[in-house]
Image: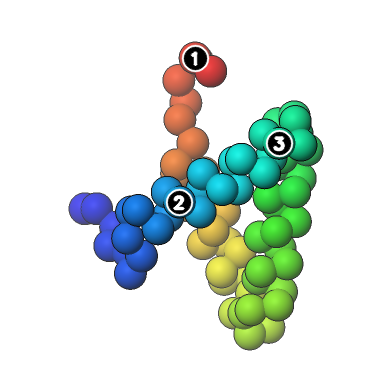
Amino acid sequence: MPQLSRYSDEHVEQLLTELANVLEKHKAPTDLSLIVLGNMVTNLINSSVAPAQRQAIAKSFAQALQSSVSNDQAH
């Protein structure tokens, strides 16, 4: 079943493009990009989620990330 979102695909794609452009502008390699994005996620959770909910949100995010990663051998 597809997941419903309160955000439009266009809005999500616009933000994704802007974030990717910043990383590209700085010629950030994959490992640095992942460090920066991971730190951003951590900061968002710590600053915007109630302490009692942080572990659950982090776990849910990690599970969604793992589910979205492809196992194919091409890259």
Mark 2 burial class by Cα count in 10 Å: few <14, some 14-19, many 20+ = few
Q: Cα distance, mark 2 to mark 1?
A: 26 Å
Dividing the picture into quadrants, the one containing residue 58 is bottom right
Residues at discs 3 and 2 in contact (Cβ within 8 Å): no
Where residue 60 sits in the image (x, y, percent)? 51, 62
N-terminal-most mark, 3 or 1: 3
For residue 40, side relative to residue 65 (left or right): right
- Tag 2 secondary structure: helix
Is residue 25 depicted above or below 50 in this figure? Answer: above
Residue at the outermost left position: 1
Name which quarter of the figure residue 68 lies in. Answer: top left
Say whether residue 4 is left or right of residue 34: left
Where does the image place residue 73, in percent across and percent down from the top left? Answer: 50, 15
* Labels 3 and 2: the sequence-earlier one: 2
Q: Which mark is residue 25?
A: 3
Give the CA separation, mark 3 to mark 1: 25 Å
Mark 2 or 1: in front is 2
Residue 74's disc number: 1
